[in-house]
Amino acid sequence: MIYKGNQPLQTLSNQDFSISENKLALYPNPNNGVFKIQMQNEMSDFVVEIFDITGKAIKNYYFHTKSDLDNYSFNLSTIAKGTYFVKVYDTKSSFVSKLSIN
């Protein structure tokens, strides 16, 4: 797994919200900034991006396998409390879910 800093790769668009959220689960949610992601779909070489409420990408992570994601615990405890969006995507599919940090 490779982590890339705060360089935004893209912004979140309205089109992203047409994706079904039941294929992506964030737990616990709400949380204190520490959470895990569970996906139903098998993916390889994919990106997890965290967006703020304005659609600006604030964090991005790269994973090679679903197993890498399953074993990873995200820690966003240093960012401001609020509502964020988590987007998981590769070249074939995209999933978005809402994240609440208290």
Image (tube, rainbow, N blue to C red):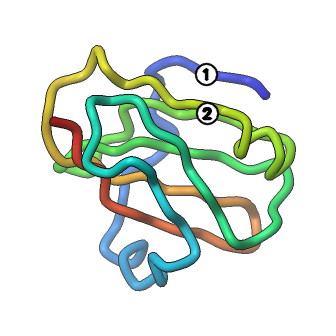
Which dot marks residue 69? none
For the residue carrying disc 2, how many other residues have a C-alpha within 10 Å: few (<14), some (14-19), or many (20+)? some
- Quick one: SS at disc 2? strand
Measured as percent of width and height from the top left, residue 30 is found at 25, 48
Left or right, residue 56 beside residue 83: right
Q: Is 2 rendered above or below residue 92?
A: above
Measured as percent of width and height from the top left, residue 61 is found at 61, 33
Measured as percent of width and height from the top left, residue 26 is found at 45, 54
Marks 2 & 1, CB-CB < 8 Å contact? yes
Which dot marks residue 4? 1
The type of residue carrying mark 2 is Tyr
The type of residue carrying mark 1 is Lys
Q: Which residue is the site of mark 2?
A: 61
Q: Is 12 rendered above or below residue 65?
A: below
Q: Quadrant of the C terminus?
A: top left
Return the residue nearer the eye: 19 or 57.
19
Return the residue nearer the eye: 77 or 61.
77
Whole-angstrom CA distance, mark 2 to mark 1, is 6 Å
